[in-house]
Image: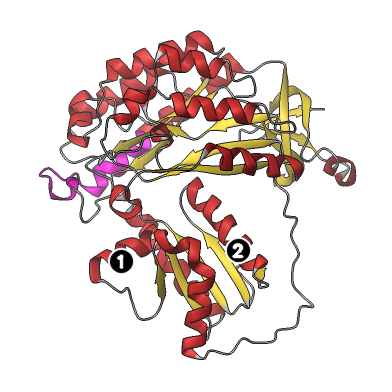
Amino acid sequence: MRVAFLTLGCKVNFYETGKMAKMFEEAGHEVVPFEEYADVYIVNTCTVTNIASRKSRQMLNKAKKINPEALIVAAGCYADEVIKKDGTGMDTFFFIPNKDKKDIVNIICARMDKTGWEVKNISRQHITKTYNGHTRAYIKIQDGCTQFCTYCIIPYVRGELKSRDAINVVKEAEELAINGCKEVVITGIHISSYGAVTDKADEFVKLQGKPLLSLLKAVNNIDGIERIRLGSLEPRIISRSFIEGLASVTKLCPHFHLSLQSGSDTVLKRMNRHYTTEEYLAGLEITRKYFENPAITTDIITGFPGETEEEFEETMDFAKKAGFAKVHVFKYSRRYGTIADKMDGQVSGEVKAERSARLSALEKELGIKYQEEALKEYEKVLFEEIAEIDSKKYITGYNERYMRIAVPAENIACAETFCNTITGVHITGRTESGILTGTI
């Protein structure tokens, strides 16, 4: 069969798509670009917001237009949500929940046999072959979440906590290193819960990140892996002992994504986030003591139910005080089945949009300020690709603090030799769109 994939949502989904594609290839099927004619289209969906759910439906319909006779598969969190609502999903598409992704090849082959759909013998003449190597690869170490924030649907669709055996994680990282991967990103639905064996929401706090630290140190010893980057961390995992342990992981990037969601204590309480802004700031102080100018990035939701102008201003003030390198701004999305969906004081779309715009403007200011403070004259850049920026060709990549840096690719053939290498770059300025530039 010719099987096409499209991935929406988080790093975990991208990791799982890679695993599913590999399973199809190992079973003798051909994985092709999503825009091409295929027998099966698999959309690894997201449902974290209403916009994500709508995008998932749009991509499923797009696949149907490419080949109306194909089997259109919705995998992932949107599939789980639909199945939970009506038990089967819509007749137009075939739904596979997260728990069945590991068996997706057998499930789809059985479905194809049952319906008697014919696999078309399409000419391979115009198939685009893509390089399978990666400069950066995700490694999923954990699944599930038991935090039950009042706005979030994910605990209901991802289920109980599950941690991968450390030996298997290290083996996967070793294979990536053999294939030339320079950087691994440790990811999961709630990686702070790595090693937790019960569904108690506070067990990971008691573990103090020890299982995660042990895993990181094992990956740190792998030859060929030059950088380790962490996915999103729960603020409550930050303690002096945990950060001190992270500082001993020599390949760890000084880039920490600590999800905040609001800079107002009253809003945090309504969100069922089990920390205060004071505790969050204390975590930042510890982190900055052990790491030089770490990039602290975060998520913030605007327009949560009941959010007053005063509470939003508290969030704006807190963002300035925290000195974030980057803020991912989200307008609150009402999710059926969550506690927040039933809360009084739902904020209008106009107010959410206005607050989102104000916070986004502040985010740009904070990003530039952080770059000015943390950027050195010479940066080590892991180059990834040739890209067009402001109508000019550049070779681009990221430094340890995840700043994107571009070097003019005047000779493309020469520039390509730098892909998947960590190279010193002299910073010279910015492009018109604000991306940092430099010279080798």
Residue 224 visible to the viewer: yes
Q: Which residues are magenta?
A: 339-358
Residue behind mark 2: 23
Residue at 59% of width from left, 56% of height from top? Answer: 18
State the image quarter where residue 431 is shown: top right
Give the image location of residue 119, x and y in percent.
61, 86
Quadrant including the C terminus: top right
Q: Quadrant of the N terminus?
A: bottom right
SS at badge 2 = helix
Q: Position of residue 316 (x, y in %)?
A: 32, 25
Q: Is residue 350 rendered to the left or right of residue 289? A: left
Q: Looking at this view, is 199 or 149 the one in front?
A: 199
Residue on which the image places disc 1: 82
Who is closer to the viewer here, 312 or 86? 86
- Counting residues from the start of the chain, the first of labels 1 and 2 encountered is 2
Dot 1: within a 10 Å radius of its alpha carbon, few (fewer than 14), some, or many (20 or more) residues?
some
When the figure is inspected, residue 92 is found, relative to residue 84, above or below; the finding is below
Q: Residue at x 51, y 46 (%)?
A: 11
Q: Nearer the viewer, residue 171 or 379?
A: 171
- Residue toward you, 143 or 362: 143
* Label 1 element class: helix
State the image coordinates of residue 254 (x, y, percent, origin top left): 56, 22
